[in-house]
Amino acid sequence: MTRVLVINAGSSSIKYQLVEADTGERLASGLVERIGEPLGHVVHQSLINDAHGAGGSGDGGETVVERELPVLDHTAGFAAMVEAFAATGHPVDSLGITALGHRVVQGGGDFIEPTLLDDGVANRIHELGELAPLHNPGHYQAIVAARRLFPGLPQVAVFDTAFHQTMPPESSRYAIDPAIAADHGIRRYGFHGISHQVVSRRAAEFLGRPLASLKQIVLHLGNGASACAIDGGRSVDTSMGLTPLAGLVMGTRSGDIDPGAILHLLRRGLDVDDIDELLNKRSGLLGFAGTNDFRDVRAAAEAGNADAQLAIAVYVHRIRAYLGAYLLELGGADAIVFTAGVGENNAAVRAEICADLDWFGIRIDPDRNEADARGPRRISSDDSRVEVLVIPTDEEAEIARQAWELVRG
C-alpha cells in the first residue's frame, strides 16, 4: 500500500485527499469547513469501487456525502471526516493508509525537507506562526488533532518554503541590518514551493530531458500567484518573500508595494490590522475590479469596464517584469511553464504575458495556446527557441509522494 491521507488545514477548514503516492491517483477527497462556527459543513467524495474495497479504486463512480453539523474544533473536524469515510462504506481503518501528509506553509529556515512530526516539530511549526499568522496556527491545530486521532500512523510535514531554501544569499536576503534580520527571522522564504517543485519536474518529464539540465521559469498563477526561477531543479529566486504577500498581483493580495506606503498609511491613522486586511484581503484583482475571480475580471474587461482593464494590465505587467528579471538572472531559459488555475486555463493571459518576446526566443502558437485541452502540453511554436508549456500542478500528489518516500525509508 502507498496510500497517504493528505491534509491541507486552515484556521477554520480541513481539506483532505486520499492519494496513491506511487501513481497520484485520487481515491477520496473532502472538505470540513466553518470550523468553530455554530454550524459546520462537510462534503466528502469517494471514488473507491465497492467491488474492490480497500484493494483499489475503479470505475464504480463517485459517492458523495454532504451534511451540516456543529464542528467545534479541528478534533471534531477530523471526527467528521472519519464519519464521512464510514458513511460511504469505507471506514478509514479499512483503507490501508500508511501515512498522513500535512501541508505546512511556513517552515522558516528550520525545515528544508519533509519531516516526521513529533512534539518538537509540531511546537516549532506553531512558533513559526509568527511569520505566517494566517496559515501555521491552523496547521498546528490540525496536526495536534490528527496525531491524537491517528496515533499509530506516521505523520509528515511537507513545507511550502522548503523548495526555496536553495536560494543563494543574494536572492534570499533583504538589505537591512543583519542583526535585526537574524533576530526576527527577516528574509525571503518564498512559497508555492510544493507546486514549483512538482511542475518543474513534470515539465522535464514532458520534454524528455534531465531536470538537472534545464533552466525553467515557472509561473504559478492562481488566486495566489508567484514566479520561480529554477536552475537544474533548484530554486534560485522566487517572487514571494517573508510572507506570501510579496511579488505578483493576486486575487486579493497587492503583491509588491513600496514599504514607505505602509509607513504613510500608519502615519495617516490606519493601524497594523487595517493595513494587513487591506493588503491581504482587499487588494489585487479584487481591489481593482471588485472581484478576485479572473474569469469575471476578464469578462468585465471585454465588456469595456475600465477598472477591470487596468487590473489585467497591471497583473500582466508585473508578471512580465519578473519574467524578464529571471531570464536575465538565469542567463536565458529552456522553458517557461504556466500552471495553477489562471495559468492552466486562461489562454488570453498567457498570450499577453508572452507577447512580443521574439527577441528572447519566446514565441507561442495561437492555435496550440487556444486549444481546448487539458493535461501537460506545449503552446510554443515550432520555431520558438524557448519551450512554453502548460503543466497542471498537483500539490496533493506531491505531498503524498514526499511523505511516502520519507516513511518507507
Image (cartoon, grey):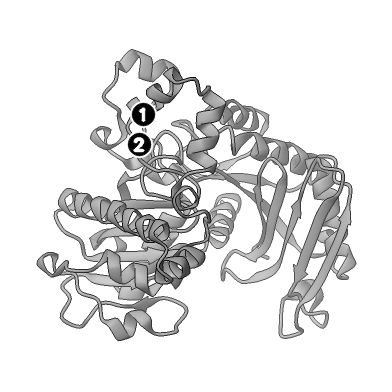
Label 2 is placed on what type of residue?
A: Ile
**Relative image position of residue 168 (x, y in whole percent):** 27, 37
The answer for how far apart the CA atoms under marks 2 and 1 are is 7 Å
Seen at 84% across and 56% down, the residue is: 82
Seen at 35% across and 56% down, the residue is: 310
Asked where in the image residue 377 lies, by quadrant, the reply is bottom left
Q: Secondary structure at mark 1?
A: helix
Q: Residues within 10 Å of mark 1 (few under 14, many from 20)?
A: few
Q: Nearer the viewer, residue 233 or 243?
A: 243
- State which mark lies toward you, 2 or 1: 1
Label 1 is placed on what type of residue?
A: Ala
- The quadrant in which the N terminus is found is bottom right
248 displayed left or right of 361: right
Q: Which mark is residue 296?
A: none
Seen at 25% across and 62% down, the residue is: 214
Asked where in the image residue 397 lies, by quadrant, the reply is bottom right
* Residue, disc 2: 257
Query: Compared to 13, does 51 lie above or below?
Result: below
**Relative image position of residue 133 (x, y in whole percent):** 58, 32
**Relative image position of residue 56 (x, y in whole percent):** 72, 76
* Residue, disc 1: 261
**Relative image position of residue 19 (x, y in whole percent):** 64, 64
Query: Compared to 138, does 3 lie above or below?
Result: below
Asked where in the image residue 121 lies, by quadrant, the reply is top right
Q: Nearer the viewer, residue 356 or 323?
A: 356
Seen at 16% across and 58% down, the residue is: 332
Label 2 close to label 1 by CB (< 8 Å): yes
Q: Secondary structure at mark 2?
A: loop
Q: Residues within 10 Å of mark 2 (few under 14, many from 20)?
A: few
